[in-house]
Image: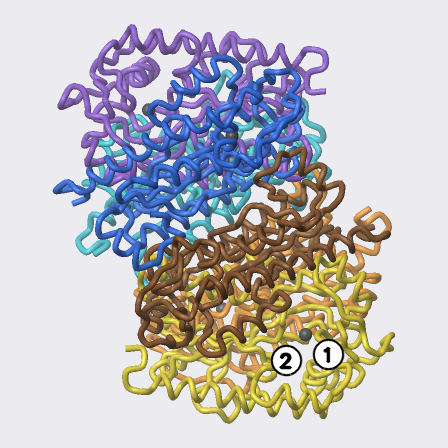
Chain colours: A orange, B yellow, C brown, D blue, E purple, F cyan
């Protein structure tokens, strides 16, 4: 079930069966000469929505589409939250869902740069309960899609050389599969981009002049993407089913 | 052009022609027994994306999909930001776009409850410049889709009675046109919902037990929606063309 | 009763009869060549204090005298809060009054530029209750004095041409009636000032070089002001009496 | 000159002669059985406005009327800002005045409980400059009216016993002189109130059941008040004249 | 007992006997040509740790070592928090200790510039309880080490001339006694430094070019320091014993 | 050189040779039945101070001793910052050091739970520069002491079984070596503690009843600690020397 394509009465009924929700989360940031600005949030959304089809009691919320991308602000089209802003926004999303009775909020993440801020946001939410000595009643899960079962092995097989860590052929393949009308071509020199540290945006562009980090994105293809989506969606579906089953066991969250 | 389906080099090229961008903005909140939780952000997104097709140099950014909906938190599925959080998030979105050279940021809004917070956010951004005595260089525009030329007249003609102010047949028709697989049916008693003040969420649900405010959403249809989308998209396209033309005039923003 | 001219025991006694309070709120900002910097907060204060005389159980609190006026910072004497600051300050005022048992906090506003921020502040206060799923117990009312019954009609009759929207003859007449020793005269060219958009302070002064927006303030007179005060004060008195009566009805706020 | 009874052009002219401004600041809080809730801000305002009459180039801004009074929230009518809110509000007031060219902002304070927060606010403003290694260009002065030359000696002479530290006969005398129609009478038992620590509001009311701290306010009289106002106003006038003279010396603020 | 050299079970046991804790607090800031950057926090820590030896049930927590020192940022090595940051950090320290059942949190302070911010932080903590109308259950104490019984008299006797108010011979003597390997020598011209106002860091360095304020620190010696530590530690030990005794009395904190 | 045992003139001289500084950072939190509450910040401090002895131009600042430990608040003695507070505090520390010309700020971290918040703080600092399109000029490094060259291999050899992830024998050995008078003994049942997820503090104590996570701390000894300190300090010294050398190369930070 897609939350934003449902009514509140449908969500009320869902909550009687499952208190788990998946929130795709990513970033809107440059992805090199051929990658889409939406790559990170699109990948999380594509995989979550694919998994939802055919899953039982898997609920997917709206996509948190702008994340922490300050280092990419030197490239037009990047939109970033400050970490402090993102912590507050995540706190409000989580508080809203918790108010309805959701107990497991599973963030399917598409952007490595979001990880520290998401984890800090979780701690911020838990700290409110901890300072008061009461239970939050929440299980907050951060899962990067590339760490879902089978995904990394497939990507290594598909792209044994030049995968890199940003604007990489895996993520670009996924968007090519889902948005075939938006496949871009452009030369990339050198074929495999340089790697380097991440500091501020001016410094980042000095080190990574076309935005790529260690990657050769020209290897991407819709076919590769389709297979990655399939493996990731299946693994996600399995994880949510397991969470639903755990919640349904006697004594869970008692 | 859709920003998140473009590369940074495409946005760089766009900026040489136009420094205008459209950001659809809405809310993820209950919309009565038959309205989708995503109605408000979906409507803004649907209209903006329709307008983009066939327009010249109209750039649409990602959708700001969770807004200020505290009064709807009594209904499952609603997600809300606090006004203070939303001001910070909008400040970061605007600052990101301004850093790339965008000068006119046009928020196409789908949620009445967002209006004060968006306007406060604009003032927050302008205040930074004003306290320093320097120019912001920004034109920040808030436009509600139902105020685009021709839309209100059409809606009054379509729904002379029972339009109401929330979960209304206009917005639901628009989502029915765009998401025909997600058309919902449910009884609504009374046919036209009560109206009332907006305070906190518990109070709101007391006054508006099924979430509707003064509306009879069962009048909605995909056909009505299609016509509303057409009129709104054309008006939006005209407005953006006018903004681009104004910017292109000699002396603009000099 | 004027709160700041009362003792805490008098307020305690008042609360046994009425849980309504009026807070005049405005802005300290330039009002053109002849308008006082305090115009907006003085008008709200003048009307509230006039209404208090002769009313039964009308309690008026201290005036919130500095509001959101960032766009006027290009003119000496303007003092402005950022919207984010004003939201926090209003939250603290409201929380203080709510802690004493006030249930209806009625802000009589004298500055259009305050409206979004005051409304956002109300939502910020309500959101605290809404996220917790509990009632706030509060009715927060924003009323602009120029929208009190009879005021607009009188102003249109007094100033059929050149009323404008800032530094206008209505508000200046009111301060002239109340502060006759501070009536100012200065030439205004052109007689009716230009109108235009509101962005940052430098931009504002470009468009509105003497601070007026669409107004011809030289039409102001103490007599006009006296009549405006009388009509506004009577309407305010009626509104507060109605709120007191509603609160006194069996079942109110039960 | 009273800022809020002046036009922006008058303030512009004033700035050519003096970059000094006085801001009365106080608190709106209980002052025992006979003291007005506005005592602290009224006293500062009364003295500043009295001093302004007859002074040359003394400019008085609007009164900052609600301060830090959390410990008095157990008594109806008290309104308090949190320290964190007050710091932001003072920062915005100071930033506004600094933007116009004021260099010396002199806060005439009427509430002891404000002192730490005002000083912290000054440091907050200075820190912005200090972290950047640039000058603030500001002289921020906090002066309590009871420390103006001659005031303490007079008060000790007037009230050799039972002056106390809150709801004291000095401050109540001042408001009696200025607001003779609002003189209150009520029994006070014991005649001299107990003193004690200041912690939270519930604790405060336990220790100070009628709100007084160590004082016998029934000694207050309008005559005592008139003499205190006279001495304080003269001392204030002298201090501002000295600040103006210092600023006018060659090399000042060079 | 030193908290950070204890286990949680030892602290649990301590809480059964005493709910008092001492937190040394200071600043890391320049202290003239011969003073250590850590002087302020080292002095508080040295005295507290000395007092702990031989005291019964005196618990000393970790040292809050970076405080509010914005005015010293013009000298290398100074580290400062903004007042607003320090308020939040103190709130979190206090909230943590309160969550464990500590009722008396005694800050032994070594830096005058911290005083307003610490007091504002106390009010910030108390305000949370006061707005809710509930007890905080906390006694928050700020004690500057130079105000402990006997310390000032001894310092006046040791340094009758040139004590000054920053980088003074008392505090430098204390660090010389505790860190004899870090005794510094450097010329100081003039022997007694100038005094002056405290504003921003650039202004501060103009007025106090080598960082001293009114002091002649070359009078410092380890022997003087040893005697100051002894007197201060004894007085602190007495104060904590008295607090423990008061807490143990029947009816305390009932 | 230890910053807090140095004068500002010594730091000024250091900056002419090296713009690198080491800040030990940790947490004050429960470490099981035998671990000290200060373990995490003490370990970082011990290693940094040991490395400083004998190194050339290695500067160590004061220890950031209270970090993000919300999940340990169920155990007496733990003190925690919220992530949002810690971000602000780190921003102020970094801004202070940057104002003096430090370019490389190397945080030697002793607490895994700090990692996301420290990284978010770095991004917060960089974002300020990135939104303005200017360079921060900063290299911010986070290094956990257990990842210094050779440390992990040694710990695995020392504790092949039962090392665990909190209150582990490595860190406890280090504090035993440095604080032999504070070696604690207590039974631990079961010998190897359970592992589990980290959520709020109540939940944490349910899962980890004595505070340990997967560890058998009774294996700790001062001898093991001494060897760990030696290896870690040497590796740290080497890293700082390399950073100094890199900075000294022609063209560095040009
Ligand atoms: Ni990516
Ligand atoms: Ni809607
Ligand atoms: Ni006005
Ligand atoms: Ni008072
Ligand atoms: Ni000192
Ligand atoms: Ni540890």
Task: Confirm or deny contact between disc 2 and disc 1 (CB under 8 A).
Answer: no
Ligand 2 sits in quadrant: bottom right
| Location of residue E138 in the rendering, given as x and y in whole percent from the top left corner | 61, 26
Q: Which of F85 and D39 is in front in this view?
A: D39
User: Which image quadrant is residue E29 in?
Assistant: top left
Q: Count every numbered label the image shows and give the total.
A: 2
| Location of residue B13 in the rendering, given as x and y in whole percent from the top left corner | 36, 83
- Residue at the (20%, 38%) spot, across then down: D245
User: Is A48 on the left-hand or right-hand side of D61?
Assistant: right
Q: Mark 2 lies on which chain?
A: B
| Location of residue E201 in the rendering, given as x and y in whole percent from the top left corner | 27, 39
Q: Is label 1's Cβ within 8 Å of ligand 2?
A: yes
Q: Nearer the viewer, residue A143 or D215?
A: D215
Q: Is mark 1 on a helix, strand or loop?
A: loop
Looking at the image, can residue B87 be seen?
Answer: yes
Q: How far apart are marks 2 and 1 (CA)?
A: 12 Å
The residue singled out by tag 1 in the image is: B168
Q: Quadrant of the N terminus of chain E?
A: top right
Q: In which quarter of the image is the C terminus of chain E?
A: top right
Looking at the image, can residue D133 be seen?
Answer: no
User: Is F227 on the left-hand or right-hand side of D167?
Assistant: left
Q: Is label 2's Cβ within 8 Å of ligand 2?
A: yes
Residue D37 versus residue C151 in the image, above or below: above
């Amino acid at each position: 079930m897609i939350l934003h394509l449902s009514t509140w009465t449908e969500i009320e009924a869902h909550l009687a069966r499952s208190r788990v929700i998946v929130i795709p989360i990513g970033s809107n940031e440059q992805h090199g000469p051929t990658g889409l600005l939406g790559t990170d949030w699109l990948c999380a959304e594509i995989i979550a929505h694919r998994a939802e089809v055919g899953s039982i009691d898997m609920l997917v919320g709206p996509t948190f589409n702008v994340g922490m991308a300050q280092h990419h602000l030197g490239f037009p089209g990047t939109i970033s939250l400050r970490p402090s802003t993102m912590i507050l926004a995540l706190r409000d999303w989580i508080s809203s869902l918790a108010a309805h009775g959701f107990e497991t909020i599973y963030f399917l993440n598409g952007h490595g740069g979001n990880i520290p801020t998401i984890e800090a946001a979780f701690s911020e939410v838990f700290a409110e309960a901890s300072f008061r000595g009461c239970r939050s009643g929440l299980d907050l899960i951060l899962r990067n899609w590339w760490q879902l079962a089978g995904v990394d092995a497939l990507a290594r097989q598909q792209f044994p050389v030049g995968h890199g860590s940003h604007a990489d052929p895996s993520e670009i393949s996924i968007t090519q599969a889902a948005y075939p009308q938006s496949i871009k071509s452009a030369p990339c020199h050198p074929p495999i981009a340089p790697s380097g540290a991440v500091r501020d945006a001016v410094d980042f562009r000095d080190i990574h002049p076309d935005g790529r980090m260690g990657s050769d994105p020209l290897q991407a293809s819709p076919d590769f993407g389709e297979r990655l989506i399939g493996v990731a969606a299946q693994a996600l579906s399995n994880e949510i089913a397991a969470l639903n089953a755990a919640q349904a066991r006697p004594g869970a969250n008692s």
